[in-house]
Image (cartoon, helix red, strand yellow):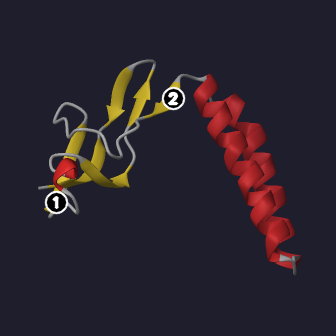
Amino acid sequence: MLTALLDVLDDTERTEKAVASATDVAVVKEGIALVFNKLRHVLQQKGLKAMESLKSDFNADLHEAITEIPAPTPDLAGKVLDEVQKGYYLNDKIIRFAKVVVGK
């Protein structure tokens, strides 16, 4: 895993140097997005998958409710309205529960 991340680390260091002298914010954003996408791709290749929680039914086996707020519409009661921290699977096993805000 660490060997796979070395390329991302190299890109991050190059981005850090470029940001220090950059004057065009759009170029900086594009460079950071490229590095982030590469990191995401490497992690996905190793079996990491983000949990999709927004607008789904609250499930205590997948989600940790950090708070409840009034649902804006009745059909959103009991659903995940916001995701404070993403949940993740590694090869179909939950490695981190999603921290969510639930409608009541």
Outermost residue, front side: 74
| Foreground label between 1 and 2 | 1
Q: Which quadrant does the C terminus fall into?
A: bottom left
Label ID, residue 48: 2
- Residue 13 location in percent, x, y? 78, 57
- Is 40 rendered above or below residue 77? above
Q: Earlier in the sequence, mark 1 or mark 2?
A: 2
Q: Could you say which is closer to the camera, residue 80 or residue 44?
A: 80
Would you call the spot at circle 1 few (<14 residues within 10 Å), some (14-19), or many (20 or more)?
A: few
How many angstroms separate mark 1 from mark 2 (CA)?
Answer: 27 Å
In percent of the image, x 77 and y 50: which residue is there? 34
Q: Amino acid at mark 2?
A: Leu
Label ID, residue 67: 1
In the displayed structure image, the side of residue 8 where residue 72 appears, left or right: left
Q: Secondary structure at mark 2?
A: strand
Outermost residue, left side: 104
- Residue 24 location in percent, x, y? 86, 77
Quadrant of the rendered image containing residue 61: top left
Q: Are marks 1 and 2 in contact (CB under 8 Å)?
A: no
Q: Amino acid at mark 1?
A: Thr
Would you call the spot at circle 2 few (<14 residues within 10 Å), some (14-19), or many (20 or more)?
A: some
Quadrant of the rendered image containing residue 22: bottom right
In percent of the image, x 63 and y 24: which residue is there? 45
- Residue 74 location in percent, x, y? 16, 54
Q: Secondary structure at mark 1?
A: strand
